Amino acid sequence: MDVGICYSRIRRDEKLLLSELRDRGHDVTKIDVRKERFSVQDPPSTFDDLDIVVDRCLATSRSRYLTRFVDAYDVPVVNDPETAAVCADKAHNSLVLAEAGVPTPATEVAFTKESALSTIESFGYPCVLKPVVGSWGRLMAKIDSRSAAEAILEHKETLGHYEHKLFYVQEFVEKPGRDIRVVTTDGDPIAGMARSSEHWLTNAAQGAETEAIKIAPDVADLVERASNAVGGGLLGVDLMEVGGAGSGEYTVHEVNHTVEFKALDEVTDVDVPAAVVDWLEATVGGVEVTP
């Protein structure tokens, strides 16, 4: 099959994916989105004859618009623009999870610092303030007191961008020093890992330690439900254990649509890029190529 990989920087994740595709004899076109122009009338020739496009853009804004244009050019894109739109916006993400009955942390969105402060006070301390768009744990704040809340809200209000005028407030979930990331294709788990840290943020990008975990049936069920809620595709589902490790209770706090998998591939016995390419082949139509 002919696969387009859209990127703004080739990281370890993209190298793993490119290597697996080429090893199987697939034709790969690397598309640097920083150099592309997207017409609303005439598709760029870059996308001619591609069987599928995989979005690996770093910037959320590029990801959302790229997928919309590629879809308009009638080229299958992973992930599709509707899934990208849901996952790129934390508030939208929380809404669809709640609507689907997937357990997710209590969340409120306020439009002024005054109403945000009321929300924070109603949650109690600590609670968490997040940007509606963002990744890698950036600009997230654990708020421990009213004075801290007032200072952070004042700071956000003066930042200027309209997204900082959306105050996304979430309950603080007491987790056992770790959270769980499961990479999935259309709700079918590929593999999972625990990300552990003494810091309250347990993102691998923030230096958390990672280890492979066995995916229990109840976790697999939540992953499938969360995937279905956002529209399916190649996703990273993030869960926290409510009540401590081994409690058997989980909450899904986020679903990621341009999921990084290098950390997972390093700790699991599962060949993650191979599983991703298996799914891409099946998505295109069961294509099998002998190198």
Image: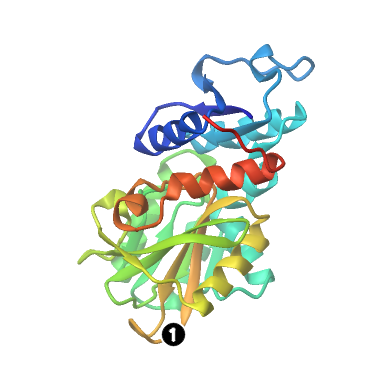
Residue 52 vertical placement versus 127 (above, below): above
Dividing the image into 4 quarters, which one contains the N terminus?
top right
- Residue 28 image offset from top left, x and y in percent: 54, 24
Residue drawn at x 63%, y 71% is 98
Element type at marker 1?
loop
Q: Nearer the viewer, residue 276 or 126?
A: 276
Which amino acid does the dot numbered 1 rest on?
A: Gly
Q: Position of residue 3 (x, y in %)?
A: 60, 28
Coordinates of residue 175 in the picture (x, y in percent): 34, 76
Residue at 68%, 29% in the rendered image: 51
Residue sitting at 37 percent across and 49 percent down? 136
Left or right: 226 in relation to 167: right
- Using a 10 Å C-alpha cutoff, classify the residue at mark 1 as few (fewer than 14 neighbours), some (14 to 19) or many (20 or more): few
Is 115 on the left-hand or right-hand side of 153?
right
How many badges with numbers are in the image?
1
Q: Which residue is mark 1?
A: 248
- Residue at image location 30% in from the left, 61% down from the top: 201
The x and y percentages for residue 217 are 52, 78
Give the quarter of the image for residue 171: bottom left
